[in-house]
Image (tube, grey):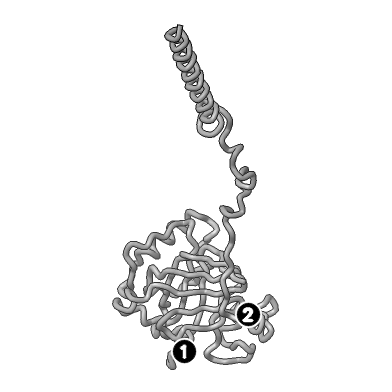
Amino acid sequence: MEQNENKKRKGWLIITIAMLLVFLISLGGVLWYFFGGDGIDQDAFKNPSSQNGTNSSTESQVILVDNPIDFATLKAQNPDVCGWITVPNTNVDYPILQSSPDKDNDFYINHNLDGKYNVAGSIYIQRNNSNQFTDRNTVIYGHNMKNKTMFRTLHNFRDPKFFEENEYFTIYTPGHIKTYRIFAAYRYDNRHILNSFDFTDKAVYKEYLEFATNPVSLIKNVREGVKVTADDPIVTLSTCISDKRYRYLVQGVLIKDELTK
């Protein structure tokens, strides 16, 4: 009799253990279904703010940097100020002006920041170019002064060593700091570049760049490995030399455009 009771208890124990195993297996399947399986979309368990690209922690934010140039003061002095150019290891560190329509296009070839006549003139761009420096080729003019002011020290780039060691110049504008990498410096003829080439035509600009990156000149330095495409805006710094048949050009391609406060 006692043996029969023991057999019954042992049987119920086996059944109970089996049912418990079945329950645990089933529970595991449910958990996998909801939290790791292929059932419900797992994104439903994520932070709602991270869905549909609205996660503020991953949104790209525009970082505004400080602009070292006080354009408010400069424009109060002369509203024709549109920028400032700095070329490291030269004396080029000047405001850039563009004459208003009531003045001659080359007014600043012989007028200073105060608008007064001065043989040294100013660093300036013509109205052929945008004063936002957004054109495919912005040409900036400056005199080759014997006292090493204005654009005289651009001629330092004739020296291969100086050219190799000095790669960049910067143009500041209200709202922007634009960094350019110098890709070529060379003697060029005295034609008016902006009147000689239709840079609104991409094919024309591409052909011009093919020359600018490999100029035919006895006086030239070209930086190896700098790629300039028809989608890249450039700036041409232009000054005179002793032979009036020629100009000396230093050209840079835009590599960085930072927004400022």
Q: Is residue 89 left or right of residue 48?
A: left
The amino acid beneath tag 1 is Thr
Q: Nearer the viewer, mark 1 or mark 2?
A: 2
Could you say which quadrant of the image residue 248 lies in? Answer: bottom left
The amino acid beneath tag 2 is Phe
Tell me if I can see residue 129 in this picture: no
Question: Looking at the picture, how far across and down is residue 161, in whole percent?
Answer: 29, 78
Residue plotted at (50% across, 82% down): 142
- Specify few, some or many for label 2: CA neighbours under 10 Å numbering under 14, 14-19, or 20 or more: many
Instruction: Name above or below for residue 11 compared with residue 64.
Output: above
Question: Looking at the picture, how far across and down is residue 144, in whole percent?
Answer: 45, 86
Instruction: Name above or below for residue 167 compared with residue 58.
Output: below
For the residue pair 104 and 133, the one nearer the viewer reads as 133
Identify the residue under disc 2: 71
Instruction: Name above or below for residue 112 compared with residue 206.
Output: below
Residue plotted at (57% across, 92% down): 118
Helix, strand or loop at label 1? It is loop
Q: Is residue 223 left or right of residue 43?
A: left
> In the image, which disc is placed on residue 149?
1
Tell me if I can see residue 46 in this picture: yes
Instruction: Name above or below for residue 14 compared with residue 231.
Output: above
Question: Looking at the picture, how far across and down is residue 24, in whole percent?
Answer: 50, 25
Q: Pick whichever of labels 1 and 2 is earlier in the sequence.
A: 2
Residue plotted at (63% across, 83% down): 74
For the residue pair 206 and 168, the one nearer the viewer reads as 168
> In the image, which disc is placed on residue 46?
none
Helix, strand or loop at label 2? It is helix
Is there CB contact under 8 Å for labels 1 and 2?
no
- Give the spatial CA distance, label 1 vs label 2: 22 Å
